[in-house]
Amino acid sequence: MIGKKYRSGRHIGILSLAWLFLFASCEKQNLSVYTKLIKSPTTADLFTIKKGNDNTIWICGGTKNESTMLRSDDGGNSFSKFGGGHYHTLFDFEIINDSTIMGSAADLEFITTNNYGMNWKIQIPADDQRPKTGYLSDLYSYVKTDDGTIYLAGGEKFYHGVIYKSVDGGKNFYLTYRDHEMRDIIFLDNNKGIASAYGALYYTNNQGETWNQSNAENDFFTGLVARYNSVFCCSFEGGIYRSDDRGENWKCINKSNKSFSKRYHYNRIVFAPAGIRGICAGTEGNVAITYDGGNSWNEGTAFDNNDINDIIFLDNDIALAVGNKGVIYRFTF
């Protein structure tokens, strides 16, 4: 009996070492991403960062009960709070000019300010344009095409997704409902748009009059970005996808999550202006970077393991990242 116990313990030890080796081989290493934490005037979650027409940088976000906007007048080296905020989190926005901002917020809110953010006009789609589920879905993404058409995308509880369209500056909205929670929406021109969702990617060729489901499925698709003639999408399950036909067909070019490994989640994918260097970022500082226009990706961790929600490049070398708990980073790689 003693010999059997010894052999069993030895076998267990060998098996344990094998498991440890497997897990170690799946761990991601720190990449050569050189970050500087910028002092933030807020601890609210930050969701979107954009460049103004001059040297200004704008950030939006908020807590459960209040929106937050930040502004930098020195190219992102320092930030201060902007305006008075309103009741709900602001997820995405557009700077029309210094005084006028439009954006999408929690609880089906389309918001506008015309006085430097001191007061906000809140508009919710009319009753006949709300989801039949009754949910006041969060609107995560806002985009306006060159012809002035506004699109908002969002959803609730994974299986309830909305895309809103307005052709009169937000006075009236028209609803497209799908059984997939929407996360991001981009337009390649006035007609061609792509929307990411839980379990699906959609595309339109006719200004959002109809939305068709692509061949991509079974992933939680999040951030979208166009690069030259291709479109890239990242996912909350660690995937990176590419479409070369304007969103109708997709190919998975990188899959981070493997069996028996920690789960990695990506929120945003962006490229530098030249289109060669790019980065994908998400929860717990997980990143994937490319130096060849998205053909290959190196995975690892950065940003002090903080959750990152959005990134912009200031030029081909320097970028800014924002995330939960008010974090703002300036970085290069």
Image: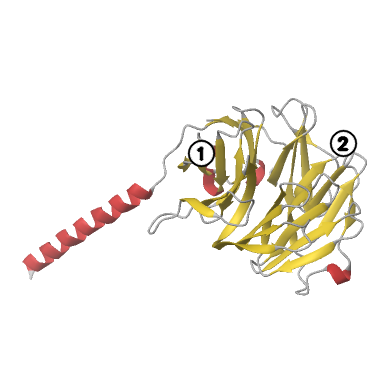
- Crowding at mark 2 (Cα within 10 Å: few <14, some 14-19, many 20+): few
Q: In this view, does 300 lie to the left or right of 248?
A: left
Q: Disc 2 marks which residue? A: 97
Q: In which quarter of the image is the N terminus?
A: bottom left
Residue at 78% from the left image edge and 70% from the top image edge: 131
Q: Locate residue 111, reporting x and y percent.
A: 85, 52
Q: Which of 208 and 24 is in front in this view?
A: 208
- Crowding at mark 1 (Cα within 10 Å: few <14, some 14-19, many 20+): many
Q: Nearer the viewer, residue 99 or 39?
A: 99
Give the vertical position of 235 relative to 81 (above or below): below
Q: Is mark 1 on a helix, strand or loop?
A: strand
Q: Nearer the viewer, residue 333 or 242?
A: 242
Give the vertical position of 82 relative to 309 (above or below): above
Residue at 87% from the left image edge and 34% from the top image edge: 98
- Which amino acid type is shown beneath numbered disc 1? Ile
The disc at residue 289 is 1
